[in-house]
Image: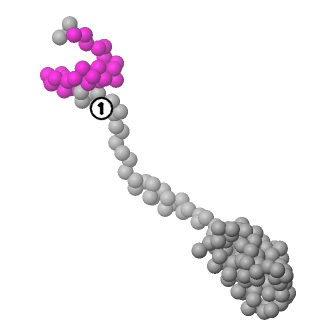
Amino acid sequence: MSNPESSLPESWVERIWATMRATYGAAFDRQWECPAGIDPVEHVKTLKAHWGRELARFQQNPSAIRYGLEHLPPHPPNLVEFRAACTRRPTYVQAQLAAPKPDPARVAKIVGGIARPAPRDPKAWAHALQAREERGEKLTLAQRDMWREALGVPAVTEEQP
């Protein structure tokens, strides 16, 4: 569960601090000594929340935090030093293979084997409607007007047979 004050999940901040404690022991804890008159639990909670906010930019790049934890300095780092270690994560560039060179003979064979579609008359629908009307089939006014307009045939007025 994330603390509303933190941008990183609490479990991430806890893991960062647990790794620091395991690596540096009491030296890590000493740098976070609680001032007199402050509740130690609240003090640590506030520090962790601050770390969570300051490391928020790495939430979408957890490998940067992993890199920072794997490359800790010899002394216990403060927040600024740890953030800098995370930022030093190298960017890995995926090696790209060269594009294969096509074999012209093979390409010609494949392309030559592709069946070409027969040419299609884009006005076949209009010719079909014309043929239906000429056979005496009753078409709607819209059908009659559309095939005539498509084929450039003058429209028939109601007086014409």
Asked if the stretch drawn in magenta spans residue 36, the answer is: no
Residue at (63, 79) in percent of width and height: 11
* Residue 57 percent coordinates (x, y): 71, 66
| Left or right for 28, reference 99 | right
Q: Quadrant of the C terminus?
A: top left
Q: Which segment is the magenta one?
A: 130-158
Instruction: Provide the residue designation for mark 1.
Output: 124
* Residue 73 percent coordinates (x, y): 83, 84
Which sits in the foreground, 35 or 125? Answer: 35
Residue type marked 1:
Ala
Which sits in the foreground, 33 or 116? Answer: 33
| Farthest-out residue, top | 159
| Left or right for 106, reference 21 | left
Residue at (28, 31) in percent of width and height: 125
* Residue 27 percent coordinates (x, y): 83, 90
Q: Secondary structure at mark 1?
A: helix
Tell me if mark 1 has few (under 14), some (14-19) or many (20+) residues whose alpha carbon lies within 10 angstroms of its own: few
Residue at (72, 73) in percent of width and height: 49
Asked if the stretch drawn in magenta spans residue 149, the answer is: yes
The quadrant in which residue 88 appears is: bottom right
Residue 114 can be seen in this image: yes
35 is higher (above) or lower (below) than 3: below
Which sits in the foreground, 158 or 34? Answer: 34
Q: Quadrant of the N terminus?
A: bottom right
Residue at (75, 89) in percent of width and height: 21
30 is higher (above) or lower (below) than 47: below
139 is higher (above) or lower (below) than 87: above
Residue 86 can be seen in this image: no
* Residue 63 percent coordinates (x, y): 68, 75
| Left or right for 156, reference 88 | left
